[in-house]
Amino acid sequence: MTRPHDCPAMRSLLAELATGAASGHERAWVLGHVTGCPACRAELDELAKVADGLLMLAPPAEPPPEFESAVLKRLGMAGSRTVGRRYSRRMMLAVGGMAAALLLVSGGSATVVYQQGETDRALADQYRQTLSIANGRYLKAARLTTPSGAQSGTVFLYQGSPSWLLVSISSAPTDGRYEIHVRDRGGVLRTIGACQVKDHAGTTGYQLDIAVAHVAEIQLTQNSQTPLTATLPN
Amino acid sequence: MGVSDEALLAGMAAGDPQAATTFVRRYQSRVYGLAAAIVGRSATADDVAQEAFVRAWRFAGGYDARRGSVLSWLLTIARNAAIDTIRLRRDQPYDPDILLTVLSADEASDDRQIEQLADTDQMRTALRGLPREQAAAVVLATFYGFSAREIAERERVPLGTAKTRIRLGLARLRDHFEVSDDKTA
């Protein structure tokens, strides 16, 4: 909880938070404080603007000639055919989101509820229908937990074409950006995207380039720390 | 005056190829320049800059005009993409002294926003005025994503000293460069 006498200690950490140098523990501490302390929040906003302003000092440089077309291609806007493919992928993610939403009951914060009698059976029917519509094979879910074991959300993995991962966070320890990493059963860790968390909650989805069966673990990191992990059983 | 950055960003997010093309053309040199400053001029910088635009497209809904300009938001995304690359590939980041020289050099900028130019000049002057060790600590954290502990190890100083350098350095920059909320309103 925020206490006025915390402010002097916080002030010394605000610059570290603004530049990204604060450790995960310190980030949680400071963010918890500034939520209830307008003075420290204003100070943090000012310092963050200064830190962001430093990035403006990087001198402009012309990228390679094919840069623009490469970006547009990645955005699926390089031609009508790729536009269609990108939209279909986005639609897949949207469908994925809807499928996962079938397993979510949201009431302000996204709380996952599994065992609910008739509701659960209805959800199971909808789940099977969704899988059949998208020619999916199965949907896996695993708890996203803090190092102390507290559940902070859920990850959903869909095996289909394409396969995808949906991360739903309902009670993250801190707000901000979390990098999403997938560790396969061979131990290889790859970064696949990020999830923006606001008010301790956030949801995002990405296409998976490996089979769901090969995924051993999902890690969500913030400033090199790994505050959230989901382990997939064999 | 052309289409606003905000309108282009919204158009790009909605899948408008023309808006996306204009947006990329408008900011590709700034994004690539920042990527090159962090990871060096290479194919990696190309990848990082491309990734920054992809993330901007993906997370366009998260842009909040009250918190800063589109360019500032975009450069923050580019910085994060560069840091991700450095960590993932375990590349050795550039020496902070080299980056400090690049950042402190006078720039014949082609930036179209005069107000932003004035701010950048102020920031550059402020950075030049910092003691080297404070400037290095701020740059290592801001551009390379180093934690205070990593800065302490790299600079071979106690953790408390690294923390003090970051705090004093950023405070001095702030004092020199008076941040006005009016400018970002």
Image (cartoon, coloured by chain):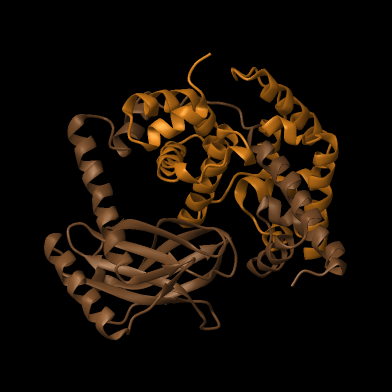
Q: Position of residue A119 (x, y in %)?
A: 27, 79
Total numbered labels: 0
State the residue at coordinates (65%, 54%). Answer: A20
Q: Residue at x 46, y 54 (%)?
A: B89
- Residue B150, position as x, y percentages in the image: 67, 60
Q: Does residue A76 appear left or right of residue B7 in this picture?
A: left
Image vertical order of residue B185 relative to residue A46, above or below: above
Residue B184 image position (x, y, % from top left) = 67, 33
Q: Quadrant of the C terminus of chain B?
A: top right
- Residue B126, compared with residue A202, is above or below; it is above
Chain B representation colour: orange
Quarter of the figure with residue A165: bottom left
Foreground pick, B116 / B99: B116
Where, by quadrant of the figure, is residue B21 drawn?
A: top left
Please tell me which residue lies in front, B45 or A147. Answer: A147
Q: Which residue is at the front of the view, A100 or B84?
A: A100
Q: Left or right: where does residue A233 sit relative to residue B91?
A: left
- Residue B18 higher or lower than B148, as above or below: above
Q: Note the chain letter of the brown one.
A: A
Q: Describe residue A120's horizontal placement relative to residue A32 as left or right.
A: left
Residue farthest to the front?
A: A118
Q: Is residue A64 left or right of residue A24?
A: left
**Where in the figure is residue A120, as x and y percent of width and height?**
27, 80
Give the answer, above or below, for where A60 lies relative to B174. above
Rendered residue at 43%/61% (across/down): A180
Asked which quadrant contains residue A60, the reply is top right
Confirm whether residue B162 shows in the render: no
Question: Could one spot residue A53 in this view of the protein?
Answer: yes
Residue at x 66%, y 67% (from the top left corner): A28
